[in-house]
Image: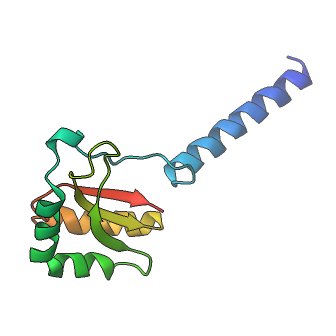
Amino acid sequence: MKSSSKIMIGVVFLLLVVLAFALLNGWFPVSRDTHPPCEQLPTTAEATSALASNESLAEEIKALGDGITVEVGKPCNDDQERGLVLVSYSTKSERDAISDLLSRREGFGVPVHLVKR
């Protein structure tokens, strides 16, 4: 095998390793979170009520990181009357902590959508 072929194979292998490492560590924004279809979302009034009645959970989530916000979001451009609880975070570690907390709790009673800033 020619040395140029060996070099090319080595470069391709190295690029694949770096790409896999980057994907696994969240260097590329890959959305893992979706929300239900807009027609299945509660009204913004229901989402607001759910957030207000679960204020302690919202405060626990906010305490997981400096840049975390919890609010009622309106993800449907064509139907602003539909809402959910929108949790914004900055880092992968914040996202993991939020997911862990939500998995151990009952939630807000309405869909929660995690969004990286």
Residue 4: percent from left, percent from top:
90, 24
x 33%, y 69%: residue: 97
In the rendered picture of this protein, how many numbered marks are placed on residues? 0
Residue 92: percent from left, percent from top:
45, 63
Residue 110: percent from left, percent from top:
13, 57
110 to 33, vertically: above or below? below
Q: Residue furthest right?
A: 3
User: Which of the 4 image quarters holds residue 71?
Assistant: bottom left
| Nearest to the observer: residue 2 or residue 75 | 75
Q: Residue furthest top?
A: 1
54 to 34, vertically: above or below? below
User: Which of the 4 image quarters holds residue 73?
Assistant: bottom left
| Nearest to the observer: residue 42 or residue 5 | 42
x 40%, y 69%: residue: 94
Q: Is residue 4 left or right of residue 13?
A: right
Residue 103: percent from left, percent from top:
18, 61
Q: Is residue 1 left or right of residue 29?
A: right
x 18%, y 54%: residue: 111
User: Which of the 4 image quarters holds residue 104?
Assistant: bottom left
Q: Is residue 12 left or right of residue 60?
A: right
State the colouring used for the structure image: rainbow
| Nearest to the observer: residue 1 or residue 82 | 82
Quadrant for the N terminus in the image: top right
x 16%, y 71%: residue: 51
| Nearest to the observer: residue 27 or residue 81 | 81
